[in-house]
Amino acid sequence: MKSNAVSLASITLLSTSIIVTLATTLTINSSIKDFTNSIHPKDFYLSFSVTGNNKDILENGVDTKGEKVRPVWEDGTKAYTIKKFGVVNRYNLAEEFPALTLRKTAIKLCTDEMLWIWQKKSNNIKDLKSHVWDEWADENGSIGKAYGYQLGVKHKYKEGMFDQVDRVIYDLKNNPYSRRIITNIYVHEDLSEMNLYPCAYSVTFNVTGKKLNAILNQRSQDILAANNWNVCQYAILVHMLARECDLEVGELVHVIADAHIYDRHIPIIEELIKREKFPAPKVTLNPDVKNFYDFTSDDVIIENYKCGEQIKDIPIAI
């Protein structure tokens, strides 16, 4: 009898403890949610991921100084980095467009580069408006068998010959729940003929309900120079393909194997992450265009893009 009483008391005490712990946890989670919503209801998570990634790399990353590295600065000095392995960011494109507000991202220019690769399937900088690829082009403007060249190569399927982009569109229209909708431009047999190995090299598309999601895999990323540039251009790609295939936009998941900050970028990053954050801009597409191959960068409509002062003349390691 005494033993039963002790057992009952123990159970009562344990139950009370669980209830208190659960209530405390719910209160904390609710407080966190209220806090984040009170700052910027939609763009908090984007701002947090950007500043959080930078702070994490600076505070917890590994310095490559003294190691054998390939990149150099324009003056020939070795370009060392502070790096983190396996950085993953998620962006809900249905809620907001993931443009950085700490400084301006040239959304139309990064769209033009994306279309240069995915739509024109070009490997010649003469087809490109920006000059970000000039360092890797030969005297004829070619970057070799890289990027757009690979997406334009036709492959044999049961249904016929397709290049990678056309195959993605075909599958999204005819077999949207396939788990095999993947592009890959890191082709080993052609690496020796590429002036730059692909950084963003693979995209996996996945339809959930009516939402088009994508995972962008990137082997290496210069966080200051290229992070939001890549995020914005692939967000635009998801929007355009969703329009073409009568789908809604879902998530963009960005997986970076080696996320790094170059040594000469550290002071810029330290200043950047202290800046005021603003709500994300509204970015939409021209409602009259549906075919992916008809889009131009002028069909990207940007509204209410409030951001910090632009940073000019960022040194680029090559």
Image: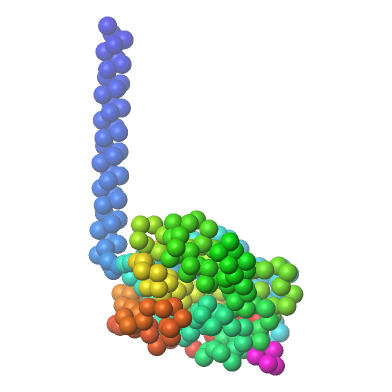
Query: On screen, 45 above or below 131?
Result: above
Query: On screen, 298 above or below 290?
Result: below
Q: Which quarter of the figure is the C terminus placed in?
A: bottom right
Q: Which quarter of the figure is the N terminus placed in?
A: top left
Task: Give how far across and how far down residue 97 sits, in percent.
Answer: 36, 73
Residue positioned most to the front: 159
Camera-side residue: 108 or 263? 108
Magenta portion: prevailing SS class: loop
Left of 279 or right of it: where is 191? right
Camera-side residue: 279 or 172? 172
Count the marks: how many? 0
Question: Which stretch did the figure color magenta?
Answer: 137-141
Camera-side residue: 227 or 67? 227
Which corner quadrant of the image does residue 149 belong to? bottom right
The residue drawn where x is 33% and y is 78% is 284
Left of 268 or right of it: where is 158? right
Task: Give how far across and how far down residue 28 sits, in percent.
Answer: 29, 49
Q: In this orientation, does residue 142 appear?
A: yes
The residue drawn where x is 30% and y is 44% is 25
The residue drawn where x is 62% and y is 87% is 124
Task: Give how far across and how far down residue 110 sits, in percent.
Answer: 48, 82
Task: Give how far across and how far down residue 290 sits, in percent.
Answer: 37, 78
Which corner quadrant of the image does residue 76 belong to? bottom right
